[in-house]
Image (spheres, grey):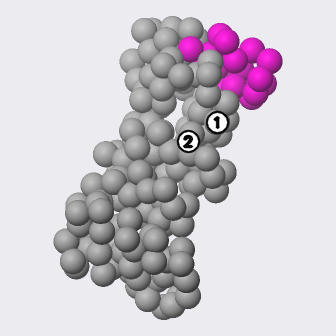
Amino acid sequence: MRSIVNEKEELKKFGFSSGILACLYSLIDLKDYKQHIKARKDFIKEGYKILPVMHKLMKSEHKKTRKQAIKIMERIAHRSSIPVAIGMLEDSESEIRWIAAKALIRIGRDTIKPLLEALVANGSESYYLRLGAHHILSELVNDEDSKELKELVHILSHRIEIHEIIPAKALNILEKDSL
């Protein structure tokens, strides 16, 4: 009970309207499943217009809040969520990282270039980013893509052994390919 109170208090700090807050309260209250599902469906119906709210919620300290927001982002699958979802590939919670990867896969090939840019910036340091990038690129890269991009997918599959070359490889692809 204390957790839901803390989550509701945190939501107030984001400065959302009372209508959005009421719907968010229903979204995070998993004890009333009907209201929870209705709130999720209502947010999804709003489409890309609700995404700025969901993006803000990624800063929540509460796993449940971040998880519900990323689920909505995944269902809406709008390209404006790409930078936020890429950032969530490094979340402390594996379930949130997984849903973020699914969101990026649903968004599609528009994800590839920003993901490569993230690998250039953080690919040698972030294990979770490399893991998510492998999952996403394995789904999005196809036979028509460059040999270098296919090689990057293969390199990412090696997890730890050769992670130092990933940023250079991603930069090379960004410079050569027209993504």
In this picture, is 45 found above or below 37? above
> Mark 1 sits on what residue?
128
Q: Which residues are magenta?
A: 146-167
| Earlier sequence position, callout 2 versus callout 1 | 2
Asked if marks 2 and 1 touch (Cβ < 8 Å), the reply is yes
Q: Nearer the viewer, residue 170 or 143?
A: 170
Image x and y of residue 3, in percent: 54, 74
Quadrant assignment, res 178: top left
Q: What label sits on residue 164 in the rendered view?
A: none
Q: Helix, strand, or loop for circle 1?
A: helix
Give the class, few, some or many, for how many residues have Cα within 10 Å of label 1's Cα (few <14, many ≥20): some
- Dot 1 amino acid type: Tyr
Picture residue at 30% right of the left edge, 81% below the top: 22
Q: What label sits on residue 89 in the rendered view?
A: 2
- Apparent side of residue 83 relative to residue 65 in the rendered image (left or right): left
Quadrant of image for the C terminus? top left
